[in-house]
Image (tube, helix red, strand yellow):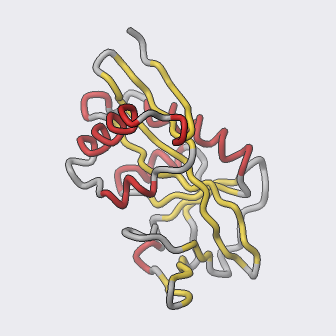
Amino acid sequence: MTDSLRLAPTHELRPERLRTLREMLDAAFGGGFSDEDWDHALGGIHAWIEDERGVAAHGSVIMRRALHRSRSYRVGYVEGVGVRADRRRQGLAGRLMAELERVIDGAYAFGALSASDDGAALYAARGWRLWEGRIEVLGPDGLVRLPEEEGSTFLRSAGGRVLPDPAAALAFDWRDGDVM
């Protein structure tokens, strides 16, 4: 069996498929993929690759809102990118990202993600740009700066659009768990 790349919105995935995707992410992150992380990966478009052993890689893009200079943007936010340990460094994450970037290009003002140290090189090599400005979240108590996210948040122009100016803060919508 050759690798098979699939793409589907969350609402079209059966509970069994969602369970297998979650199990692979739990294993890929060594148990460090929380219920909130999984929740953040739902509600958008999933891309995954299957091989003869099952799910080998997964990533999703969901919609978030970001405020910048008094304007609200629809952002394609990448979540839950993981590759099974035995399939790492074989180009699977790049194949997933190509599909997710296609979704971002067709539906959003720009793409965003918060990269791990391990993932940062992949995103930079694909043309994602490290955000050099302030990162904030619009939470229940108003705007809160997230200095720990500065230096790990990447943006990608969608369809050649101009990215926000890092001279002004980029404020994302609130969510439970790890906000970014």
In the image, taking residue 43 as reference, residue 16 lies left or right, namely left
Residue 140 x %, y %: 50, 85
The percent coordinates of residue 136 (x first, y second) are 54, 80
Q: Depth check: 143 or 17 in front?
A: 17
Q: Residue furthest bottom?
A: 141
The quadrant in which the N terminus is found is top left
Q: Residue at x 35, y 32 (%)?
A: 16
The one of 19 and 174 positioned closer to us in this rendering: 19
Left or right placement of residue 173 versus residue 55 in this view: right
Is 52 drawn above or below residue 65 in the view shown? Answer: above
- Between 108 and 160, the residue placed more toward the observer is 108
Q: What residue is at 50 percent from the left and 91 percent from the top?
A: 141
Query: From the viewer's perspective, is residue 32 above or below residue 46?
Result: below
Q: Residue at x 24, y 55 (%)?
A: 32
Of all residues, the one furthest to the top in this rendering is 1
Is residue 152 depicted above or below 158 in this figure? Answer: below
**Position of residue 94 in the picture relative to residue 28 (left or right):** right
Q: How many numbered discs sit on the rendered protein? A: 0
Q: Position of residue 41 (x, y in %)?
A: 46, 51
Location of residue 156 by image quarter: bottom right
Q: Is residue 103 above or below residue 66?
A: above
| Position of residue 35 measured from the top left corner of the image (x, y, whole percent) | 32, 57
Q: Residue furthest left?
A: 30
